[in-house]
Amino acid sequence: MMKHLLSMDQLSSADIVTILDTAESLRSVTDRPIKKLPTLRGRTVCNLFYEASTRTRISFELAAKRLSADVINFSADSKSSVAKGESFKDTAWTLEAMGVDAIIVRHGSSGAPHQLSQWVKASVLNAGDGQHEHPTQALLDLYSMREHFKDLEGLKVAIVGDVLHSRVARSNVKGLVTMGADVILIGPPTLIPPQAATWGARIGYDLDEVLEEIDVCYLLRVQKERQSEQLFPSLREYAALWGLDSRRLARMKPEVLVMHPGPMNRGVEIGADVSESPRSIILDQVANGLAVRMSLLYLMLGGRSEDGEVFE
Amino acid sequence: MSRYLLRGGRVIDPASGVDERRDLLIEEGVVASTGATLDEAGAEVIDVAGAVVAPGLVDLHTHVREPGREDEETIASASAAAAAGGYTAICTMPNTDPIADSAAIVEKVWALGREAGLVEVVAAGALSKGQRGEKMADIGEMVRSVARVRLFTDDGHGVQNSLFARRVMEYLVTFDAIYAEHCEDEALAAGGMMHEGERSMALGMRGIPSEAEELMAARDIALAKLTGCRLHLLHISTAGTAEIVRRARAEGVRVTAEATPHHFSLTDAELESYDPNAKVNPPLRTEEDRAAIVGALADGTIDAIATDHAPHALEEKDVEFQYAPPGMVGLETSLALTLTELVHPGHISLTRAIELLSVGPSRILGLPQGGPLTSGDPAHVVVFDPDGEWTVDPARLRSLCKNTPFVGRKLRGRVLHTFFAGRLTVRDGVVLAGELV
């Protein structure tokens, strides 16, 4: 396995299958009375978060703990050395000096994990960088899709909304295209620049046109400030044209999956009833995130056990 | 003052149409005589066989950080870096702290340049007070000051208000001074960190579209036509801008243009490493743009290679890409990059290279630096080995800052000696600062 996980570009379809298969094996740990494996005992994992996060940070923390690693949480907030003016590099070196084995980083600046990986000896896992990538989200999304559809090849996935600013979209398109899925990006051209076509996805502006053909409808979070940037006239108009409401859901295939990386804006990109419908697997995505992150830490830090006893 | 006899070099002097092996005698600050084989006559002989002897280089676009950020670059350190790079004149940009928008500041810059004594320091003045694009700077007072300012610019910012741009152009006609524009429509470019295109989209970085540059270039050309003002376009970087300039010149508009070594050497592929040293404004563009800039340098559309030398302290560049200021140093790599990227691959001749690095920029500023190098002319001379290989090593750069994406690059072409007004400022690649004045 690779030393760092910075981008979905690094992963072949075989790598992705290994990560998802390992996640599936580790999933069973969660169902045990004692939810812990000794694999990463004595290893230290640091969550280095320069941006607010709930699910990703907690998910990584829990994943590391389930594998018996020691976990440090560092939030670059008003109480940290960052507030005193410490640079990103100095913070990285400080953590390195304390002997961490892996740094899970979230940062508002695209490429920050890439830079970090050049400064430290520890493994770096990208937990979301600017508008660049969020590879663990893409992997848990692939895992969630694979739970329902045996084969990702040929799967028709619509990714709807703000592709331009979305690291989730970038990582998902790369992962899906690698796995042979058929990806359609849907939204207004202000949110889906034509260059996105070079990723191997189709581009469409009309959600209604693709409703009947898709297997997965992946909705991206619409950030409220996009309205003030004049990327669309109003949240109301956005919801009318690209929001998934129950009327649209009714037109889709009965086995369609509705997905969302969270946090949701109910009533904008997703109707409240749609998010709670049986077709929604939004909470499964969260649960699967834990397994996928355990899988990555296991593969990247633990390696395969010599006696094969890890999973028991 | 010493007498030097440059023996056996290939003299390339575009201003007099000379390209031949001949000797050059330098005496009392001027070229005393030239000829196939000159008598030593008590002069110190410097063997320059195999090297090129050319008029001293002129940089239209140097950011010194004095006054304000002397930790990053002083006029003395920029002068040393310039001399090491073969320059005998630099035009300093006004975005210092305070901004060079009054006679007092440009005179100070000029005086510090004289004190350093390594190159002619030509101070550019700001177009507007504080470079805010609202009120005219003290243009006439700067023109009439001892600094004799002839080029005005708000470089770092484009002038956003078209009416203000027009008024300043009209006013500059009084002095036949130059309106130099940093072409950037700030609304279109807002928040941009690199060229907008496939790569910015893939890297998740907000882009600066080519149109942000092209719209302002086209506007300024229209206004130059309207007002009759001399217009100079700084660091043009796109295929579209090159074409806009080409058409305007064909129409007879008084417009000149410059391009930087990084825009003819690098593309936005450099950004894939997220190296803040590759962050620059205007941004590194696509391969198509790079090739178009090379074409425009070759066919005469662009008049000058200018460095846009922009020193930044290590702590400012060694941060997340998003937070790093744009800019890179360039005085010590420009000649070698011109030779390596343009001359050796056959895109332009050595003569054209010297036109772009010396004759063209010196004509724009009205300096004697660009030659001719005939009897009685001031001896601003660079001697370089066009094939000498060297590797860019930050520790050996004279600039106080080392922010360049060319670190570790092997380049072909090195400066051997530089003469500024007949005085050796660089000998065998070593700056002779200590021996001066």
Image (cartoon, rainbow, N blue to C red):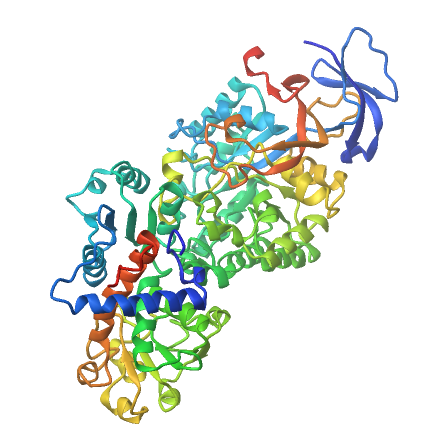
Q: Quadrant of the image for the C terminus of chain A? A: bottom left
The residue lying furthest to the top in this view is B42
Residue A147 in picture, x, y percent from top left: 30, 78
Place of residue B221 in the rendered image (x, y in percent of width and height, measured from the top left): 58, 55
Left or right: where does residue A79 sit relative to residue B299?
left
The quadrant of the rendering that contains the N terminus of chain A is bottom left
- Figure check: A153 above or below A195: below
Q: Where is residue A70 in the image (x, y as percent from the top left)?
A: 19, 48
Determine the residue located farthest toward the right in the rendered image: B36
Q: Where is residue B394 in the image (x, y as percent from the top left)?
A: 51, 31
Q: Nearer the viewer, residue A272 or B74?
A: A272
Q: Which of B414 and B117 is in front in this view?
A: B414
Residue found 82% across the figure and 33% down from its top = B19
Give the quadrant of residue A88: top left
Q: Which residue is drawn at 57% across and 50% down?
A: B236
**Above or below — where is B43 with respect to B83?**
above
Q: Which residue does the image show at 88% across and 18% down from the upper left? A: B37
> Relative to residue A113, is residue B153 depicted above or below?
above
Regarding residue B230, the answer to whether it shows in the image is: no
Q: Which residue lies furthest to the left in this view?
A: A33
Q: Residue at left 35%, top 65%? A: A19
B229 horizontally vs A150: left or right: right
Position of B197 relative to B283 (above/below): below
**Residue B434 visible here:** yes
- Report the front residue among A9 and B267: A9
Numbered disc total? 0
